[in-house]
């Protein structure tokens, strides 16, 4: 009677009275209770999809199955004529309805840690199997037997759900009573437990329990479904607030993709409408070609448009720290100029603190022995030897955990990111929670990994720069030492170039010839010491010594001993060593006269 054509003409026989009746199109009534439950179901589905996309593990799989079952129970509702579609939806709803209580208890038996023996887990689903068998029997039953079987199956599910819900509440009470060292896990348990308790308790008391006892009130049942929304909202708040699965990143990407698709679709529709109005005389095939081409162009713009929208959403999300976060990715460019290691370490730490607001934040550097002299550095070198990130969680500490790990955790460090130079571990960046309380998201961790990759290059440049600076300092010190020796020598020392001109002279030589050091540079050696020909210098393998007389500017004659040697490393240059032996020769002659 709900199908066209309308109206349907019927003949109604009541006793001996026969009447003709026309049944028109049924009036549309909005089922607000169903819409509310469907909204709750879609909340579960979105949270479950995000969890399955971001995490892997037994808890994640059970949670995804629970979200899917809740979505199916709330959304799939058999309506209309009892055809194949009606039967399929009826079986699907009952299948997920049977799994729902068992999945809920299964989740809280393995969250946050699995302590229930594995062989007991399949027994949780025995009532679900019994309920499915009863529902399958309904397909073959007829009349009063079907009604009785339906009532029994419904009572079975209500009792099954009630018992398992009480077990879930008991498990939550135990979880909440257990103290944990990790505050993050403690907050997760509290929020999820609060949502389940607030959302499930009214539904059990006002709907499930009365129906199981044979007392049903449509008003109370309608009121009981309202608190169910708190269960997915509690999960969502725990995820958003305590970063269990980085839902904020998923929401940002989803909003960016949805906005880009909607914008592209609206533009395509407007273009088609404009083409229909503008090109009225064009053939339909031509319009289709133009529409197809415009669709291709719009599809090619989806990715850049989505990226721009995501960037805008990221600016809104991080507002004050957005520029500082972007600046973190410019470390390699900003520190391309070599600088001291200490300055580089301070700059990297300061940028990470400003970009992510992490407390604490320290860049640990390892010595050549990989930190053997320091317990903390030795532990970090050991844990980061074969991985790039080490997470420090107090909940995973066992009795064999080193004291340095507990000390680092007590200081507030929650993650360490490796910094490698030349394939070896050079340091580790230790960070805590954002603002001291919010754990890092996967996007934050990826950003820090990229930062450390760039910091490794900058640190390697700084280390090479430091080694080069040390080498230059050694050379400078050696040059100063050699120059001091030359300038302190009592013998005159002069270097002559290929053109026989003086290139350098020490103070002793300047005193012998009676001129300033700067005045000697550039003069021909023959002008400085007449009568001594530098071209008579020896071969590179020989030294030549000669004696000569030199008259000073005051007319005093001095006896000189001159040694000419090749300049090592530059054969076309010569080193001339001049000694004033006048006093010694006079003493020898005086001694000989006696």
Image (spheres, rainbow, N blue to C red):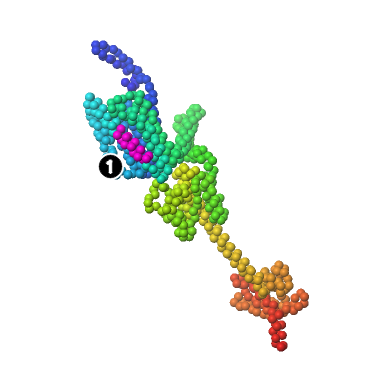
Picture residue at 50% right of the left edge, 27% below the top: 277
Q: Is residue 476 magenta?
A: no
User: Which SS class for mark 1?
Assistant: helix
Position in image of residue 67 (x %, y %)? 36, 36
Position in image of residue 385 (x %, y %)? 43, 55
Q: Is residue 393 left or right of residue 92?
A: right
Q: Is residue 164 magenta?
A: yes
Q: Nearer the viewer, residue 583 or 263?
A: 583
Picture residue at 41% right of the left edge, 35% below the top: 234
Q: Is residue 385 left or right of residue 463?
A: left
- Residue 374 to residue 25: above or below: below
Picture residue at 29% right of the left edge, 16% below the top: 10
Position in image of residue 127 (x %, y %)? 27, 35
Name the residue tied to disc 1.
120
Q: Nearer the viewer, residue 197 or 249?
A: 197
Is the N terminus in the top left, top right, bottom left or bottom right quadrant? Answer: top left
- Most common secondary structure along the magenta stretch: helix
- Residue 66 to residue 489: above or below: above
Q: Nearer the viewer, residue 341 or 526?
A: 341
Question: Which quadrant of the figure has residue 138?
Answer: top left
Q: Is residue 409 left or right of residue 345?
A: left
Is the C terminus in the top left, top right, bottom left or bottom right quadrant? Answer: bottom right
- Whether residue 476 is visible, yes or no, is yes
- Whether residue 142 is visible, yes or no, is no
Position in image of residue 58 (x %, y %)? 34, 43
Q: Which residues are magenta?
A: 162-177
Extreme-top residue of the structure: 16
């Amino acid at each position: 009677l709900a199908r066209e054509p309308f109206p349907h003409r019927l003949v109604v026989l009541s006793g001996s009275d026969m009447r003709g009746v026309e049944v028109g199109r049924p009036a549309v009534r909005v089922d607000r209770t169903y819409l509310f439950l469907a909204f709750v179901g879609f909340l579960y589905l979105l949270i479950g999809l995000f969890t399955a996309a971001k995490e892997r593990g037994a808890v994640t799989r059970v949670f995804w199955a629970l979200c899917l079952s809740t979505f199916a129970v709330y959304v799939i509702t058999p309506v209309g004529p009892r055809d194949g579609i009606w039967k399929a939806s009826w079986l699907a709803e009952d299948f997920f309805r049977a799994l729902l209580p068992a999945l809920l208890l299964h989740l809280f038996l393995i969250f946050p840690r699995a302590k229930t023996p594995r062989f007991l887990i399949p027994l949780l689903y025995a009532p679900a199997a019994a309920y499915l068998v009863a529902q399958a029997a309904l397909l073959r039953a007829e009349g009063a037997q079907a009604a009785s079987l339906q009532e029994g199956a419904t009572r079975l599910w209500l009792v099954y759900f009630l018992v398992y819900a009480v077990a879930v509440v008991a498990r939550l009470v135990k979880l909440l009573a257990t103290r944990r060292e990790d505050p993050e896990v403690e907050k997760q348990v509290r929020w999820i437990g609060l949502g389940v308790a607030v959302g499930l308790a009214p539904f059990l008391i006002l709907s499930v329990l009365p129906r199981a006892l044979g007392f049903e009130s449509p008003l109370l049942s309608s009121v009981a479904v309202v608190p169910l929304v708190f269960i997915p909202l509690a999960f969502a708040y725990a995820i958003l607030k305590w970063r269990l699965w980085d839902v904020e990143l998923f929401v940002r990407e989803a909003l960016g993709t949805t906005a880009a698709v909607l914008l592209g679709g609206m533009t395509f529709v407007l273009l088609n409408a404009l083409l229909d109005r503008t090109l009225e005389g064009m053939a339909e095939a031509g319009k289709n070609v133009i529409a197809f081409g415009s669709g291709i162009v719009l599809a090619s713009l989806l990715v850049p448009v989505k990226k721009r929208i995501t960037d805008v959403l990221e600016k809104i999300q991080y507002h004050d720290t957005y520029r500082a976060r972007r600046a973190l990715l410019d470390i390699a460019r900003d520190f391309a100029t070599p600088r001291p290691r200490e300055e580089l370490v301070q700059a990297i730490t300061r940028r990470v603190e400003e970009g992510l607001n992490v407390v604490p934040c320290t860049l640990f550097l390892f010595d050549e022995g990989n930190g053997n002299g320091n317990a903390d550095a030795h532990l970090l070198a050991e844990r980061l030897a074969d991985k790039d990130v080490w997470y420090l969680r107090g909940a995973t500490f066992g009795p064999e955990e080193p004291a340095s790990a507990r000390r680092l955790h007590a200081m507030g460090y929650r993650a360490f990111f490796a910094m490698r130079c030349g394939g070896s571990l050079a340091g580790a960046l230790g960070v805590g929670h954002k603002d001291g309380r919010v754990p890092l998201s996967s996007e934050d961790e990826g950003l820090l990994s990229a930062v450390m990759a760039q910091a490794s290059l900058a640190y390697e440049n700084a280390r090479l720069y430091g080694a080069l600076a040390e080498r230059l300092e050694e050379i400078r010190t050696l040059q100063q030492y050699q120059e001091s020796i030359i300038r302190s020598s009592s013998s005159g020392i002069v270097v002559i170039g290929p053109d026989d001109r003086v290139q350098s002279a020490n103070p002793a030589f300047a005193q012998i010839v009676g001129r300033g050091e700067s005045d000697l540079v550039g003069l021909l050696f023959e002008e400085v010491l007449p009568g001594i020909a530098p071209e008579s210098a020896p071969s590179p393998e020989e030294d030549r010594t000669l004696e000569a007389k030199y008259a000073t500017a005051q007319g005093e004659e001095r006896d000189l001993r001159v040694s000419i040697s090749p300049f090592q490393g530059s054969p076309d240059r010569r080193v001339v060593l001049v000694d004033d032996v006048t006093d010694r020769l006079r003493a020898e002659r005086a001694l000989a006269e006696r």
